Amino acid sequence: MLSQFKNRMLEIDTITSGKGVIISTKDLTECLRECARNIIKSDEFEMRTRCEFLSNQIIHYENTLYHKD
């Protein structure tokens, strides 16, 4: 995401603050949308992994209880 900002931003010299950068609303929106998608994908994967682990753990505990009986 940072490399996209760097490639799409325009460096300017301001009168009061020295150097500054400008990025268009469209580019900013696109970069943030892509970032949000990536976060959601990674969180979905994390949640799926946790659910599968918990399911396997429950099955293991149930089997352990049945074997003790």
Image (spheres, rainbow, N blue to C red):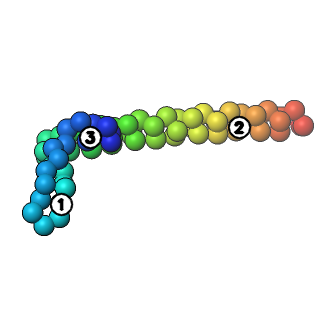
Residue type highlighted by circle 3: Lys
Between the C-alphas of marks 1 and 3, the distance is 18 Å
Q: Is residue 18 visible?
A: yes
Q: Position of residue 37 (x, y in %)?
A: 33, 37
Of 36 and 6, which appears nearest the observer?
A: 6
- Name which residue lies at 33% across and 42% down: 2
- Residue 57 marker: 2
Q: Is residue 25 left or right of residue 53?
A: left
Helix, strand or loop at mark 1: strand
What's under tag 1, amino acid-wise?
Gly
Quadrant in the rendering for residue 16: bottom left
- What's the distance in space between the residues labelled 2 and 1, CA to CA? 59 Å
The single residue placed furthest to the bottom in the displayed view is: 16
Farthest-out residue, right: 68
**Visible residue check, residue 33:** no
Which residue corresponds to mark 1? 18
Please name the residue shown 18% across and 60% down the image: 18
Give the class, few, some or many, for how many residues have Cα within 10 Å of label 2's Cα (few <14, many ≥20).
few
Q: Nearer the viewer, mark 2 or mark 3?
A: 3
Q: Is residue 16 above or below residue 30?
A: below
* Three-letter residue code for mark 2: Gln
From the image, tell me which residue sits under label 3. Answer: 6
User: Counting residues from the N terminus, which is met first, the one under dot 2 or under dot 1?
Assistant: 1
User: Helix, strand, or loop for circle 2?
Assistant: helix
Residue in front for this viewpoint, 28 or 38: 28
Q: Position of residue 50 (x, y in %)?
A: 59, 39
Q: Residue 42 at what x, y percent from top left?
A: 45, 37
